[in-house]
Image (cartoon, grey):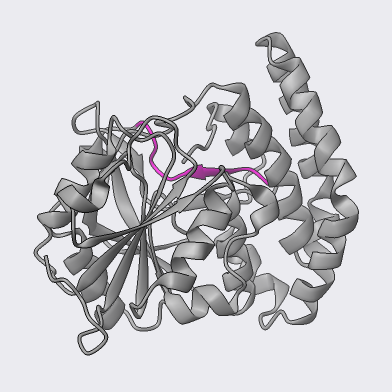
Amino acid sequence: MKKCCPEDLPLISVIIVNWNGAKFLAKCLAALKAQTFKSFEIIIIDNGSNDRSVDNLETTWPEVRVERLKKNKGFAAANNLGARLAKGTWLALINYDAFPTPGWLQALSDASIKFSEFSFFASYLVMAERNNYTDGMGDIYNVCGMAWRRGHGKPMDIFKQKEIEVFGPCAAAAFYPRELFLKAGGFDEDYFCYHEDVDMAFRLRLQGHRCLFVPDAVVKHVGSGSHGSESDFVRYFSHRNLVWTYVKNMPGVLVWWYLPAHLLFNLISIFWFLGRGQGNTICRAKKDAMLGLRKVIHKRRQIQQTRKIHFTQIKTIMDRHWINPYLKPHYRTE
């Protein structure tokens, strides 16, 4: 792995946000060291871990830069800090519980050149603990406000492996131009974690940017390595933030047209989780979403005033089948 200096800047800055990732972090770093593409740096932002996962890390991995935060500031804020510190033209975000195959960075770099009409890129996530099963091939965004990973939980061999436009990338393994990411304001730090990448994709799309799924950019992903996909933590932030994402970004005509679908989805979610013993969590999520709407509406005004595409263009890339969110419990996690 090339160690970079000011005269030899990397093309790509790989950012890992770590929080108590002792079980996975070394494996993630080993997978990065095995990359065939060499012009990259690694920045780890540690969110106040207490499991000693980054103790003396520079001794073992001298080529890695580690920034240690005193407390957990959230996935969004930590990635934003990494983006500001980065020297690369591109940002490659990777979760500490995600293990890229050797050709991951090369595939993303090649795609950015070959498909220059696309601005940002999604990796092919496969399940680390279930061989030959898909974890995600880019994100789907439904007009009701729910998002999920395309192909999640399905055998890999049922899909044709080809590049295809998707709504956005899952930030577990995403590829953005650094300048574009920063110009867009980075992830919304009020989200703390979950759905911040969906929100970013929405904002970039409203500016006319497009996202491509890159099938050769393969990453093995554990998923929810810290909290577990069924935890109250995941449920709270996912369901609070999906409301904010809808309110902030859905263009004026569409926000009213699809509002019944959005309200119905939120109502069904409340009853669903009440039946699963997570009623307090889901109700708190929706309550806090409503309490935060004043600030979210202020952000909405800024976003919609600078929108560069017609609402029909964003409509075509969204999933508009009202029943899809209810066919399977697609609870999106990082």
Q: Residue at x 74, y 82 (%)?
A: 306
The residue closer to the viewer here, 127 or 2, is 2
Whether the magenta-drawn stretch holds residue 287 is answered as no
Q: Residue at x 63, y 38 (%)?
A: 238
In the rendered image, which quarter is residue 144 located in? top right
The residue closer to the viewer here, 205 or 66, is 66
Region rendered in magenta:
145-153
Q: Where residue 185 appears, x then y in whole percent?
A: 62, 72
Q: Residue at x 80, y 80 (%)?
A: 305
* Quadrant location, the N terminus: bottom left
Is residue 197 in view?
A: no
Is residue 135 in view?
A: yes
Tell me which secondary structure the magenta stretch mostly adopts: loop
Query: Does 175 appear above or below 290?
Result: below
Q: Where residue 99 appears, x then y in whole percent?
A: 23, 44
In the rendered image, which quarter is residue 295 located in? bottom right
Q: Is residue 180 left or right of residue 157?
A: right
Query: Does 182 appear above or below 134?
Result: below
The residue closer to the viewer here, 97 or 171, is 97
Q: Where residue 270 appears, x then y in whole percent?
A: 76, 23
Q: Is residue 64 left or right of residue 75?
A: left
Query: Does 212 appear above or below 189?
Result: below
